């Protein structure tokens, strides 16, 4: 187990380093001068030069990258050009929206998908299987932002049960804040639940054909008991892996949904920073989000190895 963990840690560190290099390199070739955007097109050349020097934009690329990485490692994420506040303050404020939203969405997705997938696998070839997989196929095809608009029309306008947009903040109380997250969480969760249900169905069907399940049935175990005691636990590895990937997507890929519901989350902050050419905020946020994806995948690998010890022995 120690060698397996060491290999995964080395892969984690190498991937983080590669992600930081790619993000820094890509952002340097984007068109537009942050100093010119901040001061406007009518700014004088000497004023632009002074601002570029103050922001460190005239330093060599290697030195800028090294300074940026040292700051990231020490918790100094720099100061936003646009908001004139430390980036860590912006991240701390926005993550209190994006993280609960992602957690609520993944809980809803998992709670819907696993029972539906297991039911479809248990009723393979029957009407229940065809109906659930047909609905899942529709769910896969529906974009989450369009689903969000439908949810707003139904539950915020026609049935005014939930707010259509905005976020009151956790200071207003847990219930008002959660009410504001329900619709965007559903918009994110339902398409992901459709994908997860299909994967769960396929994994359970494959496991039901294994010898140990047939042996359990031959020893007198009922079909439902064999399903839940043997088939479902042994089918969890691909399901857990997909849940981890979906959580990474929900945490880092909610730009459109946060804009639809005007939520002040990390996705909306990334969108605003790109539009304003705020390089410091974009670099920090993209690397932090990429790091969260890599860390979640690392934890998923550990969970899969814990569920299936064969992966530890094979080093898969």
Image (spheres, helix red, strand yellow):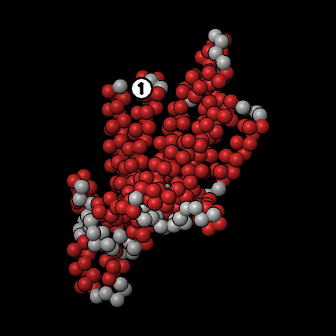
Q: Quadrant of residue 207?
A: top right
Res. 96 in view: yes
Res. 98 in view: no
Q: Residue at x 64, y 10 (%)?
A: 219
Residue 1 image position (x, y, % from top left): 35, 25
Q: Residue at x 59, y 65 (%)?
A: 160
Residue 182 image position (x, y, % from top left): 52, 56
**Near-viewer residue (1 or 22):** 1
Q: Which residue is tagged 1? A: 312
Number of numbered discs overlaid on the protein picture? 1
| Secondary structure category for the residue under label 1 | helix
Please identify the quadrant where the C terminus is shown.
top left
Residue 222 image position (x, y, % from top left): 66, 18
**Is 168 rendered above or below residue 215?**
below
Q: Quadrant of residue 294?
A: top left
**Is 170 rendered above or below residue 114?**
below
Q: Relative to residue 16, is residue 251 drawn left or right?
A: right
Q: Residue at x 45, y 56 (%)?
A: 175
**Near-viewer residue (203 or 187):** 187
Q: Quadrant of residue 129?
A: top right
Residue 54 image position (x, y, % from top left): 22, 74
Q: Residue at x 62, y 21 (%)?
A: 226
Dot 1 crowding, Cα within 10 Å, few <14, some 14–19, many 20+: some
**Is 303 rendered above or below residue 97?**
above
Q: Relative to residue 118, is residue 33 drawn left or right?
A: left
Judged from this view, the residue extending furthest toward the top is 219
**Is 130 rendered above or below residue 266?**
above
Q: Relative to residue 177, is residue 91 drawn left or right?
A: left
């Amino acid at each position: 187990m120690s060698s397996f963990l060491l290999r995964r840690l080395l892969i984690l560190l190498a991937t983080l380093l590669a992600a930081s290099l790619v993000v820094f390199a890509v952002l340097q070739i984007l068109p537009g001068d942050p100093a010119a955007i901040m001061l406007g097109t009518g700014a004088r050349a000497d004023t632009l030069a002074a601002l570029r020097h103050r922001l460190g934009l005239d330093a060599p690329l290697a030195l800028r990258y090294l300074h940026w990485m040292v700051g990231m490692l020490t918790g100094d994420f720099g100061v936003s050009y646009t908001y004139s506040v430390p980036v860590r303050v912006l991240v701390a404020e926005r993550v209190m929206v994006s993280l609960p939203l992602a957690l609520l969405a993944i809980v809803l997705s998992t709670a819907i998908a696993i029972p539906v997938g297991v039911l479809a696998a248990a009723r393979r070839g029957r009407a229940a299987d065809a109906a659930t997989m047909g609905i899942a196929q529709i769910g896969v095809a529906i974009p989450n932002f369009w689903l969000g608009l439908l949810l707003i029309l139904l539950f915020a306008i026609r049935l005014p049960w939930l707010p259509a947009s905005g976020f009151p903040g956790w200071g207003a109380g847990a219930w008002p804040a959660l009410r504001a997250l329900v619709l965007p969480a559903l918009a994110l969760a339902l398409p992901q639940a459709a994908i997860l249900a299909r994967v769960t169905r396929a994994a359970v069907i494959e496991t039901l054909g294994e010898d140990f399940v047939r042996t359990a049935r031959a020893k007198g175990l009922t079909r439902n008991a064999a399903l839940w005691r043997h088939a479902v636990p042994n089918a969890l590895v691909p399901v857990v892996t997909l849940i981890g990937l979906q959580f990474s997507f929900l945490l880092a890929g909610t730009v459109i949904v946060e804009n639809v519901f005007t939520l002040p989350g990390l996705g909306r902050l990334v969108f605003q920073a790109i539009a304003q050419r705020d390089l410091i905020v974009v670099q920090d946020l993209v690397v932090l989000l990429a790091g969260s994806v890599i860390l979640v995948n690392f934890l998923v690998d550990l969970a899969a190895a814990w569920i299936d010890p064969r992966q530890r022995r094979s080093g898969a």
